[in-house]
Amino acid sequence: MALTQGFKDTMTAAVADPAAADYDTALKAEIDAYVARFKGTPDFPDPLDWRLFKAQLLIESGGPQGKVWKGRVMQIGNKGDPGLSVVKAAAEGRIADAEGADLVLSADLKSAMKDPKQSTDQPVLNLRIGLCYLFARLIKNIRDEDIIDTSRPPETYKVLKGDSWWKIARHFRIKVKDLQDLNSSAVTRGLFPGMELHVRWGKHVRELTGWRTFDYATIADRYNGGGDADYADKLEFVHKLLLAAPKPAPTPGAPKK
């Protein structure tokens, strides 16, 4: 579907409005922090244009003249919005409900969300939570498994009555297969009390191992979820407006860079 002239006019005016820069400092800082943390991870874009996310901010809020410009600028916390509950789950350590947000949530944002003086009705916090949710949704692959901790030395374990491969593996926090691979002859003979096994301690690894493409269509799908069939086209339109916008005039007397 073609974008309406009303939308184009609203966004063109929004980009030209000096107040559109209200959250630029916070937005740039947040994107810079994500780049610093994740640059070099598989498929993470380099460079990453912060104006792509400013375009999303303007669409979600309606721009400086929109009703929510001084409030829920990313629609986080609105009825039907899943973003807040997902990021809250990450902040509270409920990994099963975090949808990967635990891997992108910064300690600083976690602290801000727990601060009773801050609220999702405040635009900067709303923006930060929205970005956290978006980055979580853009994770493609997560490695989440128990592995052998090679920093700890091998040990032996004497089988007790009632032991099973699963019970022993769980105690040492390793996979049953890894335990059995260390004791192939015992697999054939079967466990019995007094048998000595070779064991290794394990550790749990949870890390992101790949990103989706940071393009208009993917961001529209992962953040908007299909609620607006024109979201990708809107994002492209506003992003191109921002790319074409003239740079702000330097402040008189300011040192040249």
Image: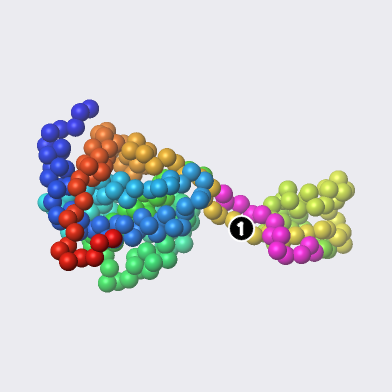
Residue 209 horizontal/vertical position (percent): 53, 47
Residue drawn at 20 percent across, 28 percent down: 2
For the residue pair 206 and 18, the one nearer the viewer reads as: 18
Kind of residue at disc 1:
His
Give the quarter of the image for residue 164.
bottom right
Q: Is residue 105 magenta?
A: no
For the C terminus, the image quarter is bottom left
Q: Quick check: 6 above or below 245?
A: above
Magenta stretch in the rendered image: 143-155
Q: How many labels, in total?
A: 1
Residue 54 horizontal/vertical position (percent): 26, 50
SS at circle 1? strand
The color scheme shown is: rainbow
Residue 58 horizontal/vertical position (percent): 21, 48
Residue 190 visible in this rendered orientation of the protein: no
Q: Quick check: 96 above or below 212?
A: below
For the residue pair 255 and 93, the one nearer the viewer reads as: 255
For the N terminus, the image quarter is top left
Residue drawn at 48 percent across, 43 percent down: 43
129 vs 191, left or right, is left
| Location of mark 1 (residue) | 204
Residue 133 horizontal/vertical position (percent): 37, 52
112 vs 187, left or right, is left
Residue 198 visible in this rendered orientation of the protein: yes
Residue drawn at 46 percent across, 57 percent down: 37
Residue drawn at 55 percent across, 54 percent down: 206
Q: Is residue 149 magenta?
A: yes
Q: Residues within 10 Å of mark 1 (few under 14, many from 20)?
A: some
